[in-house]
Image: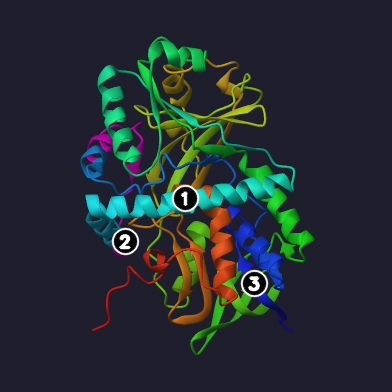
Amino acid sequence: MAERDEILVIGGGAVGVCCAYELARAGRSVRLIERGELCAGCSAGNAGLVPTSVCGPIAEPGVIGKAMRWLRDPEGPLRIKVRADPKLVRWLWLFRRACNEHTWRRSLIYTRDLMRASQKLFAERAAESDFDYHQNGILVFYRTAETLEKGAAAARVLAGMDIRSEVLDAGVVRQRDPRATNQVAGAIYFPEDAHLDPPPFVEAMGRLAEKRGARIQTKTEVLALQVSGDKVSAVETTAGTFTAERIVLAAGSWSPRLADRLGLPLLIEPAKGYSLTLAGGANGCTHPVRLSDARMVVTPMSGNLRVTAKLDLVGLNLDLDERRVRNLPQLAGEYLRFKGDFSGATRWCGLRPLTPDGLPLLGPHPRAKNLILATGHGILGLGLAPITGRLIAQLIAGEQPAFDLELMRPDRFERPSR
């Protein structure tokens, strides 16, 4: 017989555990299922940022031209595997269409407010748990006066949208961060940004959810979603069949594969990112550093140091391509002096679920009434996880959500019916 729950959450990353926590906190009967362990997906090895400085969508004005230049460099920040996939073609077309000033500004302001709401929730959860949450800001390093001036111009645009910053010359940069090399021409400091170590956060949220009554079930892979009429009637897994009044789909880049079986085409493209984590390499550093010209992030985490970079649109492919990580220490070393040898660093890659306009898919799907989507957060999944969980709980409770969810409507990329 199928096991029945009030709410079933599919996915045990940052978004999934925050949904489970908020639902359990609201008094709901919740079960979370995860095919591996908690934080086994893209939450595990990311940069750990909770930022307002880079909360705008990847689809920004001028990014197409930059992308064409990056694609010519085999070790550059972007790689796209061309494949005969109509969904990829449509994704790229809609991405190109979203690269305009109006859409970018609207999305940035919207995501800025979501991120600030998340920051408050992070601080609240850190006060009642055992994960570290640091709101020390971020330094963005530049290697030339020209790129620093371009960065300062971009920062002035952000200042007009209430995202504060401070431009620092090379001397002040080295006072703030003695690890900076002589090749750093200057930096911009964004005081509002925060960071954390993702696995301790996800694990802590799992424990908080269980304390509120949620059931966390790992090593349980979803095999299929069964449909009856306009509802998901059952969820087939490797641990048996489950039924629930509501299904929350928070499976990141694997969400489209499950939704496809329901005839719901979710336009999410997996974007592979890479990281190297150097044990004991933080060397007293208290803030992340973004290496603007190299498009990399260096983050201190629990005494360790993590270098993250790259964006590969190569489908559901989790092979770690050594060519994409081998030059990261050299590139980062042009900006920062490191303590330790990266030859022994832990290598990682993971898939970030990107939508064409950079905003998540959040809310009920109109063609599957009991299916609630909480996916497609791209590179901001960790940062937006707490507010996503809160919004999902409000939706299921029939309350007015704290934010207007129209911009994140799950069916917004579907072609209108004839």
Q: Which of marks 1 and 2 is nearer the N terminus?
A: 2
Quadrant assignment, res 19: bottom right
Tag 2 residue = 85
Which label was assigned to residue 8?
3
Tag 1 residue = 352
The reply, left or right, for residue 275 in relation to residue 147 is right
CB contact under 8 Å: marks 1 and 2: no
Residue 83 on the magenta segment = yes
Residue at 50 percent across and 17 percent down: it is 176
Q: Where is residue 282 in the image (x, y as percent from the top left)?
A: 61, 23
CB contact under 8 Å: marks 1 and 3: no
Q: How crowded is mark 2: few (under 14 residues within 10 Å), some or many (20 or more)?
A: few
Quadrant assignment, res 154: top left
Quadrant assignment, res 389: bottom right
Q: Where is residue 351 in the image (x, y as percent from the top left)?
A: 48, 49
Magenta stretch, residue numbers = 68-86
Residue at 74 percent across and 84 percent down: it is 1
